[in-house]
Amino acid sequence: MIIVVLGVSASGKSTLGAALATALQWPFFDGDDFHPPQNRALMQSGVPLGDRERKPWLAALARSIGDEARAGRSAVYACSALKRAYRVALMEHVEAAVMRFVFLSVTRAVLLERLAKRRGHFFPPALLDSQLRDLEPPDPTEPAPILSIEATQPVEQSVAEIAAAFALRV
């Protein structure tokens, strides 16, 4: 099984994804590590990414997801996957039966507070509104099962909720 923890910047994707992977004893992959240098440079300079800039990033993530699935390995990924089309793109090399998505729901106020406390990250707070504009929350047409959870609850509670929803042992 491949689980993708998704949401806007500062929603807690990496924190929850890493904790979930540790609990499951699965590898963890952070979507930020798949951005080409030009994407990071754009974001650092305050330029929001568009579909064109995200396309190679999503393709690299989809290849990695496909590699893990073909090798028969389970894994957890953290990736913004803001639009339904991006979630579809992540599944280019896998069947829906092996994919699960976890959407982190959180208010703008909490996101701004978290971004203000973040140090050494390439994503500036000024770009948050562009991500919120691009965000397409989950709906019934999603390409694979998706669980929405509140991103302000304790990480341990979120891990337990995900494990229960997807019938996983932690």
Image (cartoon, rainbow, N blue to C red):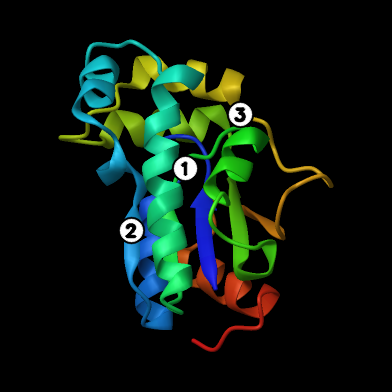
| Residue drawn at x 29%, y 27% as measured from the top left | 123
Residue 89 at x, y = what percent? Answer: 56, 41
Q: Quadrant of the N terminus?
A: bottom right
The tag on residue 135 is 3
Q: Residues within 10 Å of mark 2 (few under 14, many from 20)?
A: many
Earlier in the chain: of badge 2 and badge 1, it is 1
| Mark in front: 2 vs 3 | 2
Residue 10 visible at all? no
Relative placement, left or right, of 158 versus 137 is: left
Q: Residues within 10 Å of mark 1 (few under 14, many from 20)?
A: many
- Asked whether disc 1 touches disc 3, contact meaning CB atoms under 8 Å apart, the reply is no
Going by the numbered disc 3, the residue's amino acid type is Leu
Residue closest to the eye, 3 or 127: 3
Cα–Cα gap, marks 2 and 1: 16 Å
Classify 8 as above or below 44: below
Residue 57 at x, y = what percent? Answer: 37, 35
Residue 153 visible at all? yes
Earlier in the chain: of badge 1 and badge 3, it is 1
Residue closest to the eye, 136 or 34: 34
Q: Secondary structure at mark 2?
A: strand
Q: Residues within 10 Å of mark 3 (few under 14, many from 20)?
A: some
The tag on residue 29 is 2
Q: Secondary structure at mark 3?
A: loop
Residue closest to the eye, 3 or 10: 3
- Asked whether disc 2 touches disc 3, contact meaning CB atoms under 8 Å apart, the reply is no
Residue furthest to the right in view is 140
Q: Which residue is mark 1?
A: 11
Going by the numbered disc 1, the residue's amino acid type is Ser
Cα–Cα gap, marks 1 and 3: 12 Å
Residue 142 at x, y = what percent? Answer: 75, 47
